[in-house]
Amino acid sequence: MLAPYLRNPDESVKSQILELARQGRSIEDICLMHNKSTKKYRSFVSRTISEYRHKGILPWIKQITTVELT
């Protein structure tokens, strides 16, 4: 389902992020599961999730709270 939206096959990280987001994982959980610093990786995860929600691939079930953005 996600394959047509991922332009570069090397972007498997994005597909992993999208799958974790679809499962309802928080941004912090996704950062920790990828062994990345939450402080540095949070913006990438957040942008990836937002991008694919706007494309209609991910549902808007869970809104990102301000606590997750700080």
Image (cartoon, rainbow, N blue to C red):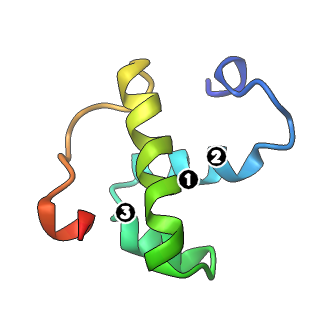
Report the amino acid beneath label 3: Arg
Q: Earlier in the sequence, mark 1 or mark 3?
A: 1
Rendered location of residue 39, percent (x, y) = 44, 77
Identify residue for label 1.
17
Q: Quadrant of the C terminus?
A: bottom left
Labelled disc at residue 30: none
What residue is drawn where x is 21% and y is 52%?
64
On the picture, is 15 further left or further right than 70? right
Determine whether 61 is above or below 32 in the image: above
Which numbered marker is on residue 25?
A: 3
Front one among 14 and 67: 67
Taking depth in this image into account, of 53 and 38 the one nearest to the observer is: 38
Mark 1 touches mark 2? (CB < 8 Å): yes
Residue 62 is situated, as x and y percent measured from the top left of the image, at: 20, 47
In the rendered structure, the answer to whether residue 4 lies left or right of residue 68 reads right
Query: 27 or 16, which lies in front?
Result: 27
The residue under label 2 is 14
Q: Secondary structure at mark 1?
A: helix
Numbered marks: total: 3
Using the numbered discs, state the Cα–Cα distance from disc 1 to disc 3 in whole angstroms: 9 Å
Badge 2 crowding class, 10 Å Cα cut-off, few under 14, some 14 to 19, many 20 or more, is some
State which quadrant residue 58 falls in: top left
